[in-house]
Amino acid sequence: MPGDPKECRERALECVELARTANTPEHKQLLTNLAQSWIKLAVEIERENALLNEHGHALQADQPSTGESTTRARARRGAVFPKSSSAR
């Protein structure tokens, strides 16, 4: 399965072009459906890539700056910490 949305769109275009010259309505419909599937795949790949990129940036924001503890870095970002049982 391709992992490049551009490649998926190229394949969709090929299906559309083939559908234009299809000999039967069934063949035309099959190729049209296939083109739609390629487009859906391209969109899914782009959505997943966006989520991965967003997640990667979030992980980088979690990293403490030089000399800063992870807990302090999270507090700086406004992370919520559970209260300890001794505070009750």
Image (cartoon, rainbow, N blue to C red):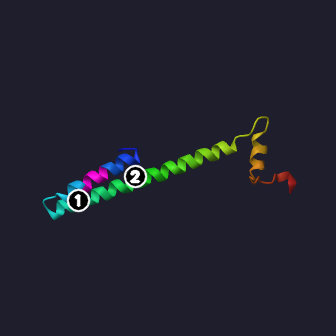
Outermost residue, top side:
67
Check the picture and name the quadrant holding the C terminus. Answer: bottom right
* Residue depicted at 78% across the width and 39% down the height: 69
Residue 77, x across and y down, in percent: 74, 50
Coordinates of residue 71 in the picture (x, y in percent)? 77, 44
Q: Earlier in the sequence, mark 1 or mark 2?
A: 1
Secondary structure at numbered mark 2: helix
Amino acid at circle 1: Leu
| Structural crowding at the residue carrying mark 2, measured as other residues with C-alpha within 10 Å and reported as few (<14), some (14–19) or many (≥20) | many
- In the figure, is residue 46 to the left or right of 74? left
Give the number of the disc on residue 78: none
What secondary structure characterizes most of the magenta part? Answer: helix
Count of labels in the image: 2
Start and end of the magenta stretch? Answer: 11-16
Residue drawn at 33 percent across, 56 percent down: 37
**Residue depicted at x 18% and y 59%:** 27
Q: Which residue is mark 2?
A: 42
Does the stretch in magenta take in 14? yes
Q: Quadrant of residue 1?
A: top left
Residue 29, given in percent of the width and then of the height, sits at: 22, 62
Give the Cα distance between marks 1 and 2. Answer: 19 Å
Q: In this picture, is 80 found above or below 70?
A: below
Residue that carries the numbered disc 1 in the rendered image: 30
Eyeballing the image, is 62 above or below 21? above
Contact check, label 1 and label 2, Cβ < 8 Å:
no
Where residue 19 sits in the image (x, y, percent)? 21, 58
* Residue type for callout 2: Ala
Query: In the picture shown, does residue 43 fall above or below 57?
Result: below
Q: Judge from the rendering whether residue 74 lies leftward or rightward of residue 2; answer left or right.
A: right
| Residue found at the very far left of the displayed protein | 23
Q: Helix, strand, or loop for circle 1?
A: helix
